[in-house]
Image (cartoon, rainbow, N blue to C red):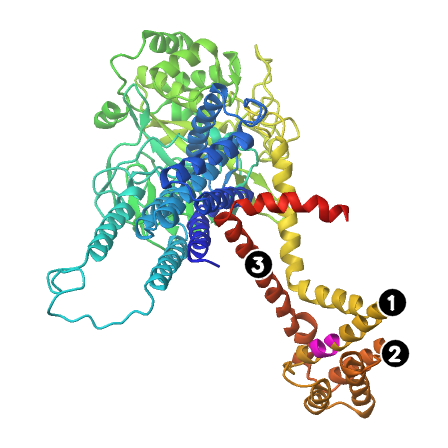
Amino acid sequence: MSGRGRLALCAFAATLMAAGALLPLVEPATWLLQAAVMVAIVGVTGALCRRVPLARPLTVALQALVTLLMLTVVFAGQQAFLGLLPTPDVISRFGALLSAGGDDVGRFAIPAPATDGIRLMLVGGVVVIGLAVDALAVTFRSAAPAGLPLLALYSVAAGLSGGAGGAWWFLLAACGYLLLLLAEGRDRLSQWGRVFGGTPRTGRLPGGEAAGAGAPPPIRTGRRIGVVALGVALVVPLALPALNGGLLAGTGGGTGSGPGGGGTISAVNPLVSLQDNLNQPEDREALSYRTNAPDTQNMYLRIMALDKFDGTSWRFSQRSIEDVPDELPTPQGLDSDVRTTEVTTTISAAPWYRQDYLPMPYPATKVDIDGRWRYEPTGRTLVGENGQSTRGERYKVSSLLVEPTREQLASAPPAPAALRREYTQVPRNLPAVVENTAKKVTSGSANDYERAVKLQDWFAVDGGFTYDTQVDSGTGITAITRFLKNKEGFCVHFSFTMAAMARTLGIPARVAVGFTPGTAQPNGTVSVGLRDAHAWPELYFEGVGWTRFEPTPSRGSTPDYTRPEAPSGSASDPQLPDSTTSAAPSTEPSASQSCDAQARRLDGCGSVAPGAAVTPDDPESPWWSGVGVAALWLAAAVVLLLPFLPLLRRRRLRARRLGSAGRTEADAFARTLAAWREITDTAWDYGITPDDSRTPRKAAERIVREGRLEPGAAQAVHRLAGAVEQVLYAPVPRAGTGLAEDVRLVHEGLHAPAGRAARLRALLAPRSSIRVIWALSERWTVLVDRWSAHRLHPSRWADTIRRRPSRQGG
């Protein structure tokens, strides 16, 4: 293989090794096979253009054109002219897919599904990087700068994955880059011949430059590239968004000193992914727990509380954090006369679920967990420090099941002035319709408790609201106003609107985010999936503390203390539909209103997200997706059959050599020589290297001696040697007889004394298979020589064409 051929192959390998860092981000990984095929086609295109040869810019331009055509066929074939040529509709399609892919990056959990948008971003990105690496390293013969696009590819993967498995992927990408540099170095050295070391420290270099005047230009270039690469490696991941590793994943970064060891945290809006988790095509289990609580209907797993409403969105205020105490302090505002039950819950997080804040029952009193966690007292939450997350964590939480009576809530005194001032703030530009609606709904109420219950029941039962996860998400005043008008939304709209309305009535309110209790399993555990993601309002009552309400219809469970009458009998079964859930028909159909938690998880009443099984842009599976699956199966079959190819090849060759003797003497003589070649190869398979300098008789004696053959097999070898001598040297050649039987005897004779390892190698990895590589190498050399001759003398093509008909006619 030529130097440029090796360099092109290394560029291809380096690109795929760097692209491997993207594998943990998306499932299934068939996109990488598609990208590999495209990168290979781009590389072959470059090799052909360089072979012609074409100008370097023209070579890169043709590679870019081929890349565009491939992406058009795969991702926009229906919009293309003749399914191949790009049109303005193709560009629009690419723009729509890239926009959808950007949204999908922010909404799906790791590993994200391979939607059309994400596939275009991945495949297109890898192919473009492969084109850049091939152009720099092979076309322009400068492998060092090719490390920059490779580093960019790895940096994107590291930034999106949050560094998951980063060290190993970085080593793999670095090995690909080093392989590329070594190939270039070998190619350059082969052009200069033998290289002598020990450049003198004084005097002048051959080019006239002083030896001690400084580093040569290539070294200076390498240093500059190293500095730029290090800068990119440090800066790019910081500027990239992360694929959510589950609900609220990675929300703890914030500003200020942050959870990385400082004294405060400031989180971004954690509701970016809640709607999309509810609409996941699969309800993946994020958490599972086992508890001694008598009833799990109130076992909400709370992650954090959003307490700041600025008119644009609800946010998590900047708070101080401290070390996790052995015993968490008594919940704010909870008096001893309120009935509480202490429960213990053991929670396990899925290995893929990455969350900076720890999901726990509220209010927790003690947390037993390993790792770097800090405590935020106001929200009673635990936040990870220095990259600590819930991924694969197992922890135990002691918490209180607070069971206030309706009378205790109704007679609650006013909240402290400071707390009331902070948690009743609403933006000045809040539309009057919010406060007016709140006053209208709660008219006639005697206290804050009755007002809160009327607000909850208006949303869940009496107001004619429809639960719909497809409504545009939003938590600002515009979204609240639209929700009150259209009466369609999901838990985000219900919880934030009720909290805002409660604040206009002077009731301290905030919004908690986490998971509903989940679904009980036969083994006694409870499974919590992504579709159990939820948001609910918490209202403050002095003497009870922060108290949960449930305004969202068909989600979670209505608290006992908000029901008109105290429940009688045993606790309700969490597997049964909540009797307080709205049964009134809504103005518009909703697939999930009459669906209990168990049915939703089993898709027994329709998907929570209509049409979630297919992408909205492409309701039917495109034709190339089946091709990709078939290609994957084909690749798997090739991988499985690859170890057996030498065995199959030897068996086929043996059968052909010992086949029919033919009809002519020439055929019989050829069969004799083929039988001898089979004996020679069989002996080679068992470790007896052939020696073409020996006569057949001497070769037979060597096989008998080194193969430790028994008399019967030894006589068979000598008979075959004699038959070969007759064919080659006798004045009147005579073809041998019984050749197949003699070959069988020799094979058995070589097999018998060999050890188990030698037998397996002779069967699965026969040494004589090297002849295939020799033959291919000879054919390649002949083809290259012919191509070179025709390229240097084009007139020979015409001569060949003119001669061919006469030869065929004869």
Residue 734: x %, y % from top left = 86, 79
Which is more foreground, mark 2 or mark 3?
A: 3
Residue bearing mark 1: 664
**How dense is the environment of label 2, judged by Cα within 10 Å: few (below 14), some, or many (20 and up)?**
some
Determine the main secondary structure of the stretch shown in magenta.
helix
User: Type of residue at label 2?
Assistant: Thr
Front position in the image: 399 or 348: 348
The residue shown at (57%, 58%) is 782
Residue 681 inside the magenta-drawn segment: yes
Q: CA distance from mark 1 to mark 3?
A: 31 Å
Pointer 3 residue: 782
Q: Secondary structure at mark 2?
A: loop
In the picture shown, does residue 589 fall above or below 282?
A: above
Determine whether the residue tagged by mark 3 lies in a helix, strand or loop. Answer: helix
What residue appears at the point 45 percent right and 20 percent down from the top-left corner? 472
Q: Amino acid at mark 1?
A: Thr
The residue indicated by pointer 2 is: 737
- Give the answer, above or below, for where 303 lies relative to 6: above
Residue 611 in the figure: left or right of residue 39: right
Residue 126 spot, x, y in % from top left: 44, 42
Task: State the CA–CA distance, disc 2 to disc 3.
Answer: 37 Å
Of the numbered discs 1 and 2, the one sitting upstream in the chain is: 1
- Mark number, residue 227: none
Question: Magenta segment, which residues?
Answer: 677-682
Residue in the picture at 65% in, 75% down: 761
Q: Where is residue 515? Give x, y as percent.
A: 47, 36
